[in-house]
Amino acid sequence: MAKNATPRYTVPGVELKDAGRLIDVLRLRLHALNDLHLTLKHVHWNVVGPHFISVHQMIDPQVDRVRDMADDVAERIAALGGVAQGTPGSLVSERTWDDYSIGRADAIAHLGALDVVYTGVIQDVREAIKEVSPIDPATEDLLIEQLRALEQFQWFVRAHLESAGGSLATAGSHTEEEAAARGADLG
């Protein structure tokens, strides 16, 4: 949590105390998005195997969109009167999740792990929406728009992990390693 997230000014119609709460919520979203775009780029660089090109090419548009999401969140923090801490040190010291754990691996193994990553990010965005909803519709709208895109990206990932009968190979996986192993079994 930020030492003093309450700004000296904010947007019209939002109380300073409420703006501080919004900034605090958005700060963790900014860290999550910066982490996600770096993780996606890591996958892009370290994916191998027969599905290499399709996954390699699928990931870059996600990287670009997630970078844009981070920019939107940072600009909302600034508009609310806060400081958008986009440095690696603040990301690492304030994040509540572990670093991505898969190195060079088969494309489907990476997609299995990414399914778990997206699940965590999406769950956190939904919680953030619940928190900001009673305070500010503009911030809520920003997060809802991002949620839709993140859910679509997870759908793209899951399409590679789903059987024709609708079973998800990574169903029940709780860790990236477990999901990667289940995904690799498909490859």
Image (cartoon, rainbow, N blue to C red):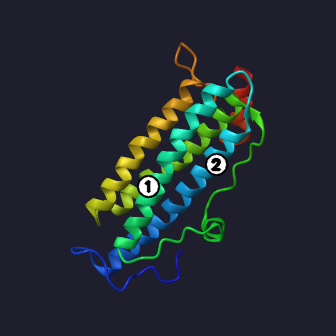
User: On the rendered structure, is 114 left or right of 1?
Assistant: right
- The type of residue carrying mark 1 is Glu
Residue 128 in the image, given as x and y percentages of width and height: 42, 58
Task: Identify residue for label 2.
Answer: 39
Q: Quadrant of residue 14?
A: bottom left
Give the labeled residue for mark 1.
127
Q: Quadrant of the C terminus?
A: top right
Q: Name the residue furthest left.
A: 13
Identify which residue is drawn at 21% across, 74% down. 13
Q: Secondary structure at mark 1?
A: helix
The amino acid on which the numbered mark 2 sits, given as a three-letter code, is Thr
Whole-Å distance between the Cαs marked 2 and 1? Answer: 22 Å
What is the x, y in percent for residue 78? 39, 72
The residue located at (50%, 49%) in the rendering is 66
Relative height, residue 52 to residue 129 (above, below): above
Q: Is residue 157 above or below residue 88?
A: above
Q: Is residue 62 above or below residue 127?
A: above
